[in-house]
Amino acid sequence: MFRLVITPIFILCFQVSSHAQSVHEKLTDELEIISNRNSIKGFGVAIFSKDTLLYTRGFGVVSDNKDEKYTTRTRQKIASVSKLLLGVSLLKAQELGLLQIDDKINDYLPFAIVNPYFPYEDITIRHLATHTSGLAKTPKYDLKALYAPTKIPKIKREMPFGIRRLFFNRAIKTINSNKEYHLEDFLINLYSPNGKWYGKKHFRKVKPGDMTEYSNSGASLLALVIQKASGISYAAFVRKYIIEPLQLESSKFDFELSHAVNEPTHYYHAGINIPNNYKLLLYPAGGFESTVEGFSILMNTVINGYSILSKESVKEMLTPQFKTEYGILWEVYPSGFVGHSGDMLGVKTFAYYNINKNIGYLLFCNTAGTKTIEKETEEIKNVLKSYFNKFATTHE
């Protein structure tokens, strides 16, 4: 049985037949055409099977300097694709005996979270990990969680005149005025009755497990659970049990990186340059930075139950929970696709694997918020998926 032991082997040690090379060139040509006519400044893609990186390539640029090309090793924020690491970390913590998925979150948190509408109903780790905890969406505080030490300019083009541009410029004004908080302090302010932002509106009138509602702050609470259970920071846990074993040292959370203000801007939103040193205070929910080359290794290793998680843990992580389309933080669809997407300031990302066909893809973009971004990313994804069978044939 094939076992992934050393990362470079996965990347380098397979021979490409002349037919496979032809498929590779055809896909590159199609993506080059898309890149040349769409609004995305730069993007990277990968197609990978259960044991091989079949294709990876960068397109476009990382800044307005046309000489700085987007490559397979361009590191960028991956937005909510970061939640895949949370799922892996929870199952790893369970394997280590630090917690159990059905434990009450209040057994670990430094403050008690109680739904005021159902004060006697316990919220478990599984509830948070499947977005069925009864916590409400908090878009206002998702915005407050964006901290920009370098001010973001107003949107002057790309967005149409009127209410939409006004909305985005108000959002930018909010981001520019945000204060920096540690993860724990941010969550205490939001969910502790003594917190300065606390309110009943942060909860739904539903029992845990009864309704799905996506929550970035709820996902971030899971990182706090891991911190308290393990005795080390969530970032340190990810580094110890995921990053170091896979030798992905270029992949880190944004607050662990020192971005120089004078570095080329890597992000674009609605036609404006976004300073690359902004941070997500709810970093477990979306603040991870990686490359298409590195993250494809992570996806493959995790899903196939090699060195990071046992196959039993992978099965639990990828099993739909509470009749939802979520496993443990991973989206799980009847089509066989598992993974997650992300959408954040200047970032649009997709990471999916089809467990029925044993093949998956990544798409990381350094651009978001344009009038055509949804159509353009959908076109790229469809092209990638159209080559699944062609690459599978060349790899047999």
Image (tube, rainbow, N blue to C red):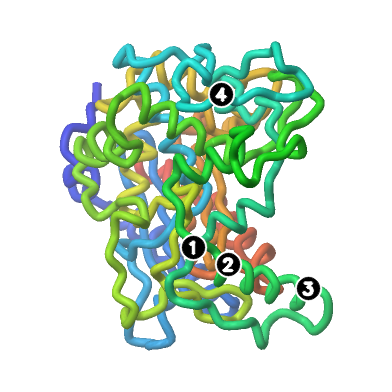
Spatial CA distance of label 1 from label 4 is 26 Å
| First in sequence: mark 2 vs mark 1 | 1
Cβ–Cβ under 8 Å for marks 1 and 3: no
Q: Residues within 10 Å of mark 3 (few under 14, many from 20)?
A: few
Which residue is at a point 50% across and 38% down the rendered structure image?
220
Q: Quick one: SS at disc 4?
A: loop
Q: Residues within 10 Å of mark 1 (few under 14, many from 20)?
A: many
Name the image quarter holding the N terminus.
Answer: top left
Rendered image: mark on residue 175 = 2
Q: Is residue 362 left or right of residue 40?
A: left
Q: Is residue 60 left or right of residue 158?
A: left
Q: Can residue 187 be seen at all in this image of the molecule?
A: yes
Q: Is residue 163 above or below residue 377?
A: below
**Where residue 274 sits in the image (x, y, percent)?**
49, 75
Cβ–Cβ under 8 Å for marks 2 and 1: yes
Q: Which residue is mark 4?
A: 112
Q: Which residue is mark 1?
A: 147
Q: Which residue is mark 3?
A: 164
Which kind of residue does numbered mark 4 sit on?
Answer: Ala
Spatial CA distance of label 2 from label 4 is 29 Å
**Where residue 250 sits in the image (x, y, percent)?**
25, 55
Spatial CA distance of label 2 from label 3 is 17 Å
Spatial CA distance of label 1 from label 3 is 22 Å
Front residue of 264/52: it is 264
